Amino acid sequence: MTDPLKPLLALEGVAAAAKSAQDAVFAVHRLPANLRGGAETAAEASVRAARASAGIDGANPELPTDGAVQDPLLAGSLRVAESLEALLPTWRRAPLQALARMHVLAASDLVDDPDALGRPRVGGSRLELLAQLVTGATTVPGPVLTAVVHGELLALQPFGSADGVVARAAARLSMIATGLDPKALTVPEVAFFRRVPRYVELAAGFATGSPDGVREWLLFCCEAFETGASEARSISSAAG
């Protein structure tokens, strides 16, 4: 069976960028604090990722001092982040079920009709193809598959609410499942948050399906993985 994503590795710079991103993330896993387990790094990374993800879509990413999160998008993003470890087995075998659950968590404060939660309104066949990729229909490196999952969900906007939060959470699950970031230590979401206009522009380019648009998105994501590794390095240093 032909690997549908293999041609992406022939796009200029993509294979090298994926290798560089993987090396940067692996280096973080080898830091002493993370060799001992990395639980503290992963916990802090999860919160930072959720805050940045909500911020990308316009929420205030700051956590209130009293701990009561009022912003519905931030609250949903934090709920999704808390669920990812439990959702990982489902993502590996039935990713569409995992997407539905993430949407329920992300959008429960945003959607008036509870029947709309977890139900994709568009993208049926493309979502099925994406699920096949996640469950083994491709052997491309983790950075490439993760970027494709992320970009495709942004392009499809399958649920009509909280799609960005779901897309970035799905990318995070892909990073773990592919072995790119098995302990979920890195925070590429921070890199996206710092460059939201560029993020939006390149996601739109990916959605066109043009070789240049796809290539630029893949390179941008690989750069974000490296930045996310730097963020994890700073977290690990603080953790001791």
Image (cartoon, rainbow, N blue to C red):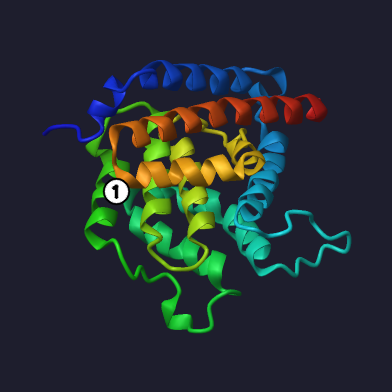
Residue 4: name its quadrant. top left
Picture coordinates of residue 207 (x, y %)? 35, 47
Mark 1, other Cα within 10 Å: few <14 / some 14–19 / many ≥20? some
Picture coordinates of residue 118 (x, y %)? 42, 70
The reply to whether residue 90 is in sight is: no
What is the residue that sits farthest to the right in this orientation?
A: 65
Q: Is residue 202 above or below residue 99?
A: above
Q: Is residue 74 above or below residue 12?
A: below
At x 22% / y 58%, what residue is drawn? 125
At x 25% / y 46%, what residue is drawn? 132
Would residue 11 be found to the left or right of residue 3 on screen? right
At x 67% / y 61%, what residue is drawn? 74
**Which of 214 and 140 lies nearest the eye of the viewer?**
214
The residue wearing badge 1 is: 130
Q: Quadrant of the C terminus?
A: top right
Q: Look at the numbered disc 1 and give the secondary structure of its residue.
A: helix
Q: Is residue 88 above or below residue 158?
A: above
**Which of 107 and 7 lies nearest the eye of the viewer?**
7
The reply to whether residue 152 is in sight is: yes
Q: Quadrant of the N terminus?
A: top left
Three-letter code for the amino acid on which mark 1 is drawn:
Leu
